[in-house]
Image: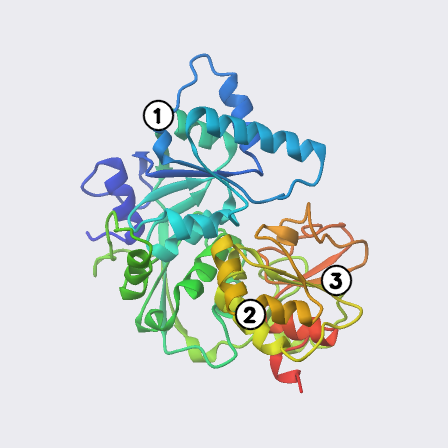
């Protein structure tokens, strides 16, 4: 019997010729990522071990991205603990470089790797054909100390992409459509695999956006077939694949979906669940207080170009705060060189340093009671972006920017 991409990656990491869905395997991890959301807790547990030991320090990557610059003495203390530990043990450490998943994609992830990240959106790494999955502090600590962990082989949902997205429709609209279709629990502990001739029409930015949000359908991981687009991305950054896998023709899938990309329309996810999706036009006219263009899902250069093209020569609505936050230092520099940041600032937007910002909801730009945010962030749960009695709508870069201009949820074609 053939294997899926997820099964092949786990089989390699487990040193087995074959595995199947439901098998529980001991695996050797290829890389371990942690950020300032929880690393201080991992360090505390590590220091309480009887025989503390790091199995392979070269596999560890630690990134400060959630609250940077620090917002309080408490945050400063936890980040100092992380910074000092990383320096003392020779751990690869980034601070101010950007959002963890974007930094990992730019600098570390390779096809075929099995990666644990102490953040739920680690599934973004599937855009490069890597099995990335989020874990908690205890699982992360065990993997850090032993170099190994256990994984139950997930079933795989296959999404065959056909055709091409229409002008003004984006990869974010596609994945929100899929999440709405299968539900927030539709991929619980499953791998979401993307293939089909439509995949070739998607950029790396598109692919990261899609894989990043798969956890919002409950997915264990997300995976895309590695093609020339992915290999060129790697080559530009001086990396080679660990292994390139495709699913066998006789691989077993829990379910197969065929998606016509031409049928996708701009989408909005309404409060307070990511699968509460409707066409963006159904939310038109909803007043907003803040708009956010950024995050590991949509803070890349392509997204900033979309927003800048729409807002050039226009102004942010006087009753709206528009936060523009590039996902990494690399993206920030490129956007600055292209003049995109100037366009945003001239329009009245607040351009910020690369960080998680209001997507995380505990630092910059949080919203108050009764306020409404439209966001390219990852989640719209109650209280996610500030006060529990606030409202978060999720949309693509064009809809967020158009809304920032008009002061209410609007699509780009409503701009005149």
What residue sits 58% from the left and 73% below the top? 308
Give the residue pinned by disc 1.
Answer: 55
Callout in the foreground (2, 3): 2
Q: In front: mark 3 or mark 1?
A: 1
Q: Residue at the spot x=68%, y=45% of the render?
A: 362
Spot occupied by residue 104 in the image (x, y as percentages of width and height): 42, 48
Say if residue 181 shows up in the picture: no
Point out residue 142 in the picture as x, y percentages from the top left corner. Answer: 42, 27
Residue 339's disc is: 2
Label 3: which residue? Answer: 372
> x%, y% of residue 176?
53, 65
Could you say which quadrant of the image residue 180 lies in? bottom right
N-terminal of the two: label 2 or label 1? 1
Q: Where is 175 relative to 19, above or below?
A: below
Q: Secondary structure beneath disc 3?
A: strand
Q: Residues within 10 Å of mark 3 (few under 14, many from 20)?
A: many
Local crowd at mark 2 within 10 Å, few (<14), some, or many (≥20)?
A: few
> Which of the two residues, 416 or 328, is positioned nearer the viewer here?
328
Quadrant location of the C terminus in the rendered image: bottom right
Give the x, y percent position of residue 306. 54, 73
Foreground residue among 182 and 370: 370
Label 1 neighbour load within 10 Å: few <14, some 14-19, many 20+ = some
């Amino acid at each position: 019997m053939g294997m899926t991409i997820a099964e092949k990656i786990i089989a390699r990491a487990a040193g087995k010729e074959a595995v199947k869905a439901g098998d529980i395997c001991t695996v050797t991890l290829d890389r371990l990522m942690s950020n300032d959301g929880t690393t201080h807790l991992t360090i505390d547990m590590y220091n309480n071990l009887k025989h503390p030991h790091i199995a392979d320090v070269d596999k560890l990557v630690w990134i400060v991205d959630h609250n940077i610059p620090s917002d309080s003495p408490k945050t400063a203390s936890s980040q100092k603990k992380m910074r000092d530990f990383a320096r003392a043990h020779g751990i690869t450490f980034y601070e101010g470089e950007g959002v963890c998943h974007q930094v990992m994609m730019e600098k570390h992830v390779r096809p075929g790797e099995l990666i644990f990240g102490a953040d739920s959106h680690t599934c973004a790494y599937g855009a490069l054909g890597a099995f990335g999955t989020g874990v908690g502090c205890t699982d992360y600590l065990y993997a850090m100390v032993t170099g190994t962990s256990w994984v139950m082989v997930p079933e795989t949902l296959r999404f065959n992409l056909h055709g091409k997205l229409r002008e003004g429709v984006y990869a974010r609209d596609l994945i929100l459509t899929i999440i709405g279709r299968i539900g927030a629990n539709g991929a619980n502990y499953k791998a979401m695999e993307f293939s089909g001739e439509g995949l070739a029409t998607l950029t790396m930015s598109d692919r990261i956006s899609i894989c990043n949000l798969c956890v919002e359908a409950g997915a264990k991981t997300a995976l895309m077939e590695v093609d020339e687009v992915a290999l060129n991305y790697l080559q530009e950054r001086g990396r080679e694949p660990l292994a390139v896998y495709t699913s066998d023709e006789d691989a077993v899938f829990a379910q197969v979906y065929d998606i016509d990309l031409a049928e996708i329309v701009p989408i909005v996810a309404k409060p307070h669940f990511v699968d509460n999706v409707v066409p963006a036009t159904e939310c038109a006219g909803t007043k907003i207080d803040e708009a956010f263009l950024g995050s590991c899902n949509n803070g890349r250069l392509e997204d900033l170009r979309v927003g800048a093209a729409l807002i050039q020569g226009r102004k942010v609505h006087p009753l709206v705060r528009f936060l523009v936050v590039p996902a990494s230092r690399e993206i920030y520099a490129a956007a600055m060189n292209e003049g995109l940041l100037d366009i945003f600032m001239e329009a009245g937007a607040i351009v910020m340093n690369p960080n998680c910002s209001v997507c995380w909801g505990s630092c910059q730009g949080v919203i108050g009671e009764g306020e409404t945010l439209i966001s390219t962030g990852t989640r719209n749960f109650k209280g996610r972006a500030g006060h529990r009695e606030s409202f978060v709508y999720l949309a693509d870069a064009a809809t967020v920017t158009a809304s920032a201009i008009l002061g209410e949820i609007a699509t780009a074609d409503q701009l005149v």
